[in-house]
């Protein structure tokens, strides 16, 4: 075993990992990377098929990002945001606001949403996705108390299967039983509403875009109706929901569950009509991951960077992390409106201050990387890369429908989830102890392709620089490993 692997085994405790399994085999120790490739301590190379858990955008060791960080390093790495402003964080906040409004470079943010809808204007920096959600949660909670009265008990609604991070507030918003059960006693109660998991629709409906009226399986948006009931029931109690928290277009950790076109705009409109603030968790979906979106009239005016923009939804809180720095450094941002900001203004002694912050808030290296990443995203090359990857991902995944253990293939933009089942006809799930998802990913790793499953859903989320041949290799490795895994089972 490599010396570094020995050190790891001796001392490192890994996230979301059964360490007994971990200690049974030598881990790949990553010592380098370039573009979509990762290299381990033995010199073996792999393709980074999940962008290092959904973080990397433009590939590893990108010259532009490296240069931006190096330039910043020559000035200063970090100074506190408590009592001080800094150059890259100020510029980044302005850029994020501009992009959240869907504005083009050098354009004033133009209100794209309906008149009167809030505009994201203020940026609160933190370190990771969980803290980005904590900030939104605390702001929404206190904003609600200040606007509805200090006696009100703000309540939150999130989606079934929701995952919003691992700190206590973020876990309270989540609804993945295996992650949350053990800590139930520490959590505050939030409510959940059904998410549109069309593949396992309890109403046995076809997807709305594939209406199958002949078999009486036409979708009547029953899930939207359920959401409306939740909001109105809570309002009737005299305690309307303070906020609706959601991952727009696709839920990640829930198993790559896409929302049918129109779901997001409908449910968020209902939430708004019932007085709830909208908290969009774009930690996974942000920065172009959900694709360049539908073209309007043959030509796109603005390339949407955020999933919400594809359904013209204007949230009150936009939570960003993972891809913010191109996946280079731990940094997050919570964008919010002037209205929320104003509720925290007051005289010093009124104590209306938002008492929250982290040591590395507004970190300068992270902000410099994020600025360079945003610039890259706007280049013609990046837009072309993403358009091509989205199409190739779609086209090359189609043949996998013929594999008997592939139940569903779900794709939103540059994110794909392949759900493995016992039998595609009955959609019967596989038993946990079969570890099918893990075994398929182990097979892929032997073929030089790295990704991690979400249960029995295999995730493909390639960095934007992935070449045609590399994506082909990822999908071939996936198909071969599925065949191999289920062959050895029988
Ligand atoms: C990863 C993730 C988080 C948590 O982010 P961390 O940086 O891991 O704390 C929150 N929400 C979504 C949707 C995520 O994918």
Image (spheres, helix red, strand yellow):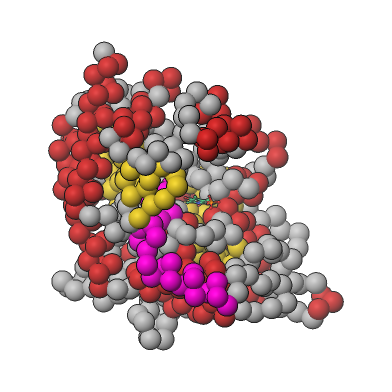
Residue name at image x 70 percent, y 36 percent: 185
Residue 231 spot, x, y in % from top left: 52, 53
What are the residue bounds of the magenta stretch? 51-75
Q: Residue at x 33, y 73 (%)?
A: 378
Residue 55 among those drawn in magenta: yes
Q: To which quarter of the image does residue 178 belong?
A: top right
Q: Does the magenta portion include 139?
A: no
Position of 437 relative to 356 (above/below): above
Q: Is residue 180 above or below residue 394?
A: above
Q: Nearer the viewer, residue 261 or 74?
A: 74
Does any portion of residue 72 appear in the rendered image? Answer: yes
Q: Position of residue 156 (x, y in %)?
A: 59, 52
Decide if residue 168 is on the left or right side of residue 61: right
User: Which residue is at a point 71% across and 68% down the rendered structure image?
Assistant: 354
Q: Quadrant of the C terminus?
A: top left
Residue 181 visible within the image:
no
* Res 184 quadrant in image: top right
Magenta-highlighted stretch: main secondary structure?
Answer: helix
Indicate the position of residue 386 as horizontal and vertical percent values.
Answer: 26, 61
Residue farthest to the top? Answer: 490
Instruction: Locate residue 260 relative to residue 155 in the image: left or right.
Output: left
Residue placed most toward the observer, 364 or 152: 364
Locate residue 377 relative to residue 15 in the image: left or right.
Answer: left
Residue located 38% across and 57% down the image: 60
Image position of 315 with respect to 74: above or below: above
Q: Position of residue 69 (x, y in %)?
A: 49, 69
């Amino acid at each position: 075993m490599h010396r570094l692997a020995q050190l790891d085994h001796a001392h490192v405790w890994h996230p979301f990992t059964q360490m007994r399994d971990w200690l049974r085999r030598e881990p790949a120790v990553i010592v380098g990377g370039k573009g979509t490739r990762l290299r381990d301590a033995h010199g073996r190379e792999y393709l980074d098929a999940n962008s290092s858990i959904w973080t990397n955008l433009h590939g590893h060791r990108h010259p532009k990002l490296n240069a931006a960080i190096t330039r910043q390093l020559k000035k200063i790495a970090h100074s506190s945001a408590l009592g001080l402003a800094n150059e890259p964080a100020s510029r980044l906040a302005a850029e994020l606001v501009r992009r959240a409004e869907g504005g083009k470079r050098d354009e004033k943010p133009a209100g794209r949403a309906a008149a009167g809808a809030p505009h994201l204007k203020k940026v609160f920096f933190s370190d990771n996705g969980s803290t980005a959600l904590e900030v939104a949660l605390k702001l929404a909670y206190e904003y609600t108390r200040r606007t509805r009265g200090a006696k009100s008990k703000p309540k939150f609604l999130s989606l079934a299967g929701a995952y919003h991070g691992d700190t206590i507030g973020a876990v309270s918003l989540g609804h993945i039983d295996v992650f949350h059960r053990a800590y139930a006693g520490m959590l505050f109660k939030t409510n959940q509403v059904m998410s549109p998991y069309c593949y396992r629709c309890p109403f046995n409906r076809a997807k709305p875009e594939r209406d199958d009226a002949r078999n009486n399986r036409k979708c009547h948006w029953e899930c939207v109706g359920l959401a409306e009931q939740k909001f109105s029931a809570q309002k009737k109690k005299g305690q309307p929901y303070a906020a609706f928290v959601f991952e727009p277009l696709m839920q990640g950790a829930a198993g790559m569950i896409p929302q049918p076109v129109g779901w997001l705009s409908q449910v968020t409109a209902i939430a708004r009509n019932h007085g709830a603030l909208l908290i969009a968790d774009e930690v996974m979906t942000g920065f172009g991951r959900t694709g360049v979106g539908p073209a309007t009239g043959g030509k796109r005016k603005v390339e949407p960077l955020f999933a919400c923009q594809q359904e013209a939804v204007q949230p009150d809180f936009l939570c960003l992390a993972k891809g913010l720095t191109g996946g280079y450094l731990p940094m997050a941002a919570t964008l919010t409106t002037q209205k929320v900001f104003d509720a925290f203004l007051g005289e010093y002694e009124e104590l209306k201050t938002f008492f929250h912050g982290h040591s590395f808030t507004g970190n300068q290296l992270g902000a410099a990387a994020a600025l360079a990443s945003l610039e890259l995203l706007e280049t013609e090359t990046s837009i072309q890369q993403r358009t091509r990857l989205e199409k190739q991902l779609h086209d090359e995944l189609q043949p996998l429908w013929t594999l008997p253990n592939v139940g569903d293939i779900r794709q939103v933009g540059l994110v794909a989830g392949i759900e493995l089942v016992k039998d595609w006809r009955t959609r019967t799930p596989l038993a946990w102890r079969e570890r099918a998802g893990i075994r398929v990913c182990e097979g892929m790793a032997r073929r030089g392709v790295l990704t991690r499953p979400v249960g029995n859903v295999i995730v493909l989320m390639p960095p934007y620089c992935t070449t045609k041949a590399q994506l082909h290799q990822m999908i071939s490795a996936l198909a071969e490993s599925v065949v191999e895994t289920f062959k050895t089972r029988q």
